[in-house]
Image (spheres, rainbow, N blue to C red):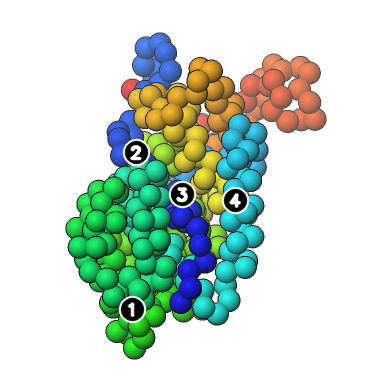
Amino acid sequence: MKREGGTGDAAEGADAVHGSTAVKKEGGPKQKRKRVTVKKEKGKKVSGLDTTAEARLVDWEAAVEGLANLHPEVTSKNVARRDELLKSCGAGSSVILDAVISTMLSQNTTDKNAHEAYRNLTEKFPTWSECLKGTREEVEGLIRVAGLAATRSERIFALLETLSAEQDSEDPSLEYLRDMSNDEVKKELGRFKGLGPKTISCVMLFGMARDEFPVDTHVLRIAKLQRWVGSGATRESAYDALNAVVPDALKMDLHCLLVKHGKVCHRCAANHKPQFPPKDGPLVCPLATTKVVDVVKMELGIGVKAEGGEGGEGGGLGKKRVKAEANVVKEEE
């Protein structure tokens, strides 16, 4: 089965840096945060720090627009990606298998090393059937630049051999996944060693054009910083929460923009030390001004009172201060 080309673009959203996800607040002493709880439905309490609720009120289009203005090359690349995906769904395509293997190579390494490993592998073996005829030692040597060569080689051969045996073909393929639902695809790919939730999500987004929002190191760190998810969120819990609220049409662009932004923005990088700091100094981060509507007022639907604020426009928040009719307000560190 002829490969469609490319050098592992399906793995663009995979981890490039595996550092701490803790983010320090900018400047000054640590500030206290207020937790607001309100009674709803016969005394049931809902936390004002429910960041899943907060994420549902983010202006996602504004976030994408702000990031795209700063990183226009990312959205331009996605336009080309979508065009390629539309052209690559015909008979004889190996796009999904390409995406799986390129994303496997991207795990726990840099984009540069992952792309080099994938290029070495596909130049030596133009098709996966040819790769099957090679040896593990050959593949290890070709992908060594990505690290963990023995483990990656073993997993690649296990995947290809399983597909070849099940399909009774020397030309393994994953194109049959196109006829499956998202849940079925996740279950099917999840049976192969080395394919975890984030890898599968990347494959579905970049190899199958499914509406998926993968959560990698950069996405998780920024989501916590923006309070789109809670501070204790894992990749898995953040994946569930964000996929439920990020609009489908924005998922590819927002994911790629956050990965790019997390590598260059001092505010959003791990420990404020970007992997690729801009030569002209720190960027003005567009996410620092992304507005979130008051959670208690909008999400829980309780009454609010406007105080002061003459000159507010059109009855909106404007410069008015709003006070939630909260039952309990307490300070916490």
Q: CA distance from mark 2 to mark 3?
A: 13 Å
Which of marks 4 and 1 precedes in the sequence?
Answer: 4
Q: Residues within 10 Å of mark 1 (few under 14, many from 20)?
A: some
Q: Nearer the viewer, residue 117 or 176?
A: 117
Which of marks 1 and 3 precedes in the sequence?
Answer: 3
Q: Give the secondary structure at mark 3.
A: loop
Residue 180 location, x and y as percent?
48, 76
Kind of residue sitting beneath label 3: Glu
Horizontally, residue 33 falls left or right of residue 66, namely left
Q: Residues within 10 Å of mark 4 (few under 14, many from 20)?
A: some
Which of marks 4 and 2 precedes in the sequence?
Answer: 2
Q: Residues within 10 Å of mark 3 (few under 14, many from 20)?
A: many
Which mark, residue 12?
Answer: 3
Q: CA distance from mark 3 to mark 1?
A: 25 Å
Which residue has dot 2 on it? 17
Kind of residue sitting beneath label 1: Leu
Which residue has dot 4 on it? 78
Is residue 322 visible from the viewing direction of this image? yes
Q: Say whether marks 2 and 3 touch (CB < 8 Å).
A: no
Q: Quadrant of residue 102?
A: bottom left
Which mark, residue 163?
Answer: 1
Residue 1 location, x and y as percent?
46, 77
Horizontally, residue 170 falls left or right of residue 268, namely left
Query: Is 215 situated above or below 31?
Result: below
Q: Nearer the viewer, residue 227 or 321?
A: 227
